[in-house]
Amino acid sequence: MPRFCPRCGAILKPQKINGEIYLVCPRCGYKVKATEKDLQSYRVKTRIKHTEKDRLIVVRDEDRVRGLPITRDVTCPRCGYHEAYYWMVQTRAADEPPTRFYKCRRCGYVWREYE
Ligand SMILES: [Zn+2]
Ligand SMILES: [Zn+2]
């Protein structure tokens, strides 16, 4: 549960001040030091921000893989199936070859090709 400002009722937002996490009211400026319990409840909520790398792996939903090409030259490291969707992602410098990602057609496992 997020905590509410005791002065004005707005939802407090976590903010780092001098290396410590405070819950700060965006409306009236009230602030209180966050407890460990606060941090846990907020951590779940603020987790929506994925890093670039996470986003590549989280190609979970079926709609997005439906249009992808399929290769039969691979073996799923998890279930041993030999058909997978694949796509290319430019993960590093533009002059380096893109990394190929696979998604198992049977178990949905996603892995990347290491050269
Ligand atoms: Zn307030
Ligand atoms: Zn598999």
Image: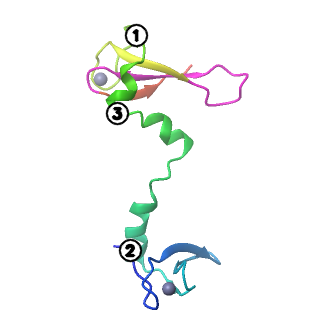
Is 79 inside the magenta-drawn segment?
no
At x 35% / y 28%, what residue is drawn?
63
Q: Which mark is residue 2?
A: 2
Q: Residues within 10 Å of mark 1 (few under 14, many from 20)?
A: some
Q: Can residue 109 be seen in this view?
A: no
Q: Is most of the magenta stretch helix, strand or loop? A: loop
User: Along the line of sight, which residue is nearer the eye, 89 or 77?
Assistant: 89
Q: Which mark is residue 61?
A: 3
Q: Is residue 17 visible?
A: yes
**Label 2 SS:** loop
**Are discs 1 and 3 less than 8 Å apart at CB?**
no
Q: Residue 8 placed where, x, y %?
A: 46, 88
At x 65% / y 19%, what residue is drawn?
97
Among the two numbered marks 1 and 2 on one chain, the one whose residue lies closer to the N terminus: 2
Q: Which kind of residue does numbered mark 2 sit on? A: Pro
Residue 39 location, quadrant = bottom left
Magenta span: 89-107
Q: Number of numbered discs present? A: 3
Q: Residues within 10 Å of mark 2 (few under 14, many from 20)?
A: some
The residue wearing badge 1 is 71
Among the two numbered marks 1 and 3 on one chain, the one whose residue lies closer to the N terminus: 3
Question: Is residue 44 found left or right of 18 in the rendered image?
Answer: left
Q: Residue 25 placed where, x, y %?
A: 52, 81
Is 102 inside the magenta-drawn segment?
yes
Q: Which kind of residue does numbered mark 1 sit on? A: Thr
